[in-house]
Image: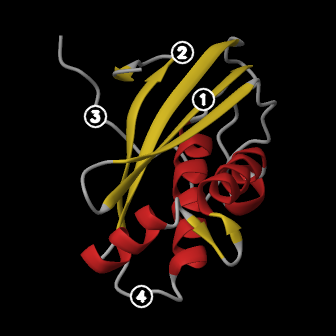
């Protein structure tokens, strides 16, 4: 049997933008893991390592974790068709990945009718933007990305590794 073609979900029958109706979906445990990288010019990375990732504005990693967590909880206010979700758990980890790159991982959990992929992506990217904001005085050649969903569980389709 042939699989039905995939279609966009945020379009109503008349082609207008619409929030997905999740009222008939089953409430299940759902989780998602997203990642974003921040790449620094070599001289900036050396300076940040020497400072222990501290800046005149405060602890870079600590501030980014708080900002990312706040973003996870407010994703529905930023992305028009995201549902407000009860967030059961949010973990953001920020580690050096090589000599001049930070890896930001954001894992989010909920028990609801819809998943938390957008929350995980929002948390990772806002944390990366916060790192940029705190370091931009050193260079505007800092590069963010890629940002990507690494995995999700719960709902109709599991994806990737958790």
- First reached walking from the N terminus: tag 4 or tag 2: 4
Q: Residue under circle 1?
A: 115
- First reached walking from the N terminus: tag 3 or tag 4: 3
Q: CA distance from mark 3 to mark 4?
A: 46 Å
Q: CA distance from mark 1 to mark 3?
A: 21 Å
Q: Secondary structure at mark 3?
A: loop
Residue 139's disc number: 4
Q: Is residue 41 above or below residue 82?
A: below
Residue 57's disc number: none
The reply to whether discs 1 and 2 touch (Cβ–Cβ < 8 Å) is yes
Q: Is residue 120 left or right of residue 48?
A: right
Q: Residue under circle 2?
A: 154
Q: CA distance from mark 4 to mark 2?
A: 41 Å
- First reached walking from the N terminus: tag 2 or tag 3: 3
Q: Position of residue 143 (x, y in %)?
A: 35, 73
Q: Residue under circle 3?
A: 5
Q: CA distance from mark 2 to mark 3?
A: 22 Å
Q: How many marks?
A: 4
User: Which residue corresponds to the image point at 40% horizontal and 18% vertical from the top-left?
Assistant: 158
User: Which residue corresponds to the image point at 51% horizontal and 84% vertical from the top-left?
Assistant: 136
- First reached walking from the N terminus: tag 1 or tag 2: 1
């Amino acid at each position: 049997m042939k699989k039905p073609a995939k279609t966009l979900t945020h379009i109503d029958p008349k082609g207008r933008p619409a929030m997905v109706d999740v009222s008939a979906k089953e409430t299940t445990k759902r989780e998602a893991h997203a990642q974003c990288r921040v790449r620094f010019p070599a001289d900036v990375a050396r300076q940040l390592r020497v400072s222990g990732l501290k800046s005149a504005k405060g602890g870079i990693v600590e501030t980014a974790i708080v900002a990312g967590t706040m973003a996870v909880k407010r994703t529905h206010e930023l992305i028009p068709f995201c549902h407000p979700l009860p967030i059961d758990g949010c973990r953001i980890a920020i580690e050096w990945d090589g000599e001049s790159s930070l890896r930001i991982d954001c894992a989010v959990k909920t028990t609801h009718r819809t998943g938390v992929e957008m929350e995980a992506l929002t948390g990772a990217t806002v944390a990366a933007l916060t790192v940029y904001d705190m370091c931009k005085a050193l260079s505007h050649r800092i590069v963010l990305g890629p940002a990507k969903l690494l995995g999700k569980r719960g709902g109709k389709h599991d994806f990737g590794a958790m």
